[in-house]
Amino acid sequence: MATQKSSFWLTPKGLAALGLIGAATYFLLIEHRQHVWQFLPFLILLACPFMHFFMHGGHGVNRGHGGHGGDHQHEGESDQDAYQRGVEDGRRQSDHRHNR
């Protein structure tokens, strides 16, 4: 029977970290409201790369990448073979575009 790894945020240390983050955020917003408002547009822009990094789920070899199109790695194919196949496909597409 496989054991599932529980989330860090549900452990006692994770809950304590969430409490500290929440308290720091509360006091930052209450005591420094004027300073926070002037940087809000930059914080929204900074959220974009963080959301992509933490919410995308990674680009692991065996994870699949549903919805992004393209060929997936064939079963039994090594990373080097997949890379070489991609290079060859790219060259064929490039040659096809240049010959038009």
Image (tube, helix red, strand yellow):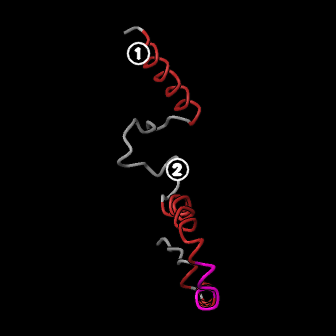
Q: Residue at x 55, y 35 (%)?
A: 78
- In the rendered image, residue 34 lying in the magenta stretch gets the answer yes
83 in relation to 60, above or below: above
Which of 32/51 is in front? 32
36 in relation to 83, above or below: below
In terms of secondary structure, where does tag 1 sit? helix
Image position, residue 59 (x, y; %) = 52, 50
Q: Is residue 40 left or right of residue 98?
A: right
**Disc nearest the viewer among 2 and 1:** 1
Q: Earlier in the sequence, mark 2 or mark 1?
A: 2
Residue beneath label 1, please?
97
Q: Residue at x 48, y 58 (%)?
A: 56
The residues colored magenta run 28-36
65 in relation to 97, above or below: below
Which of 86/80 is in front? 86
Q: Amino acid at mark 1?
A: Arg
Per the rendering, the mark at residue 59 is 2
Quarter of the image for residue 74 reads top left
In terms of secondary structure, where does tag 2 sit? loop
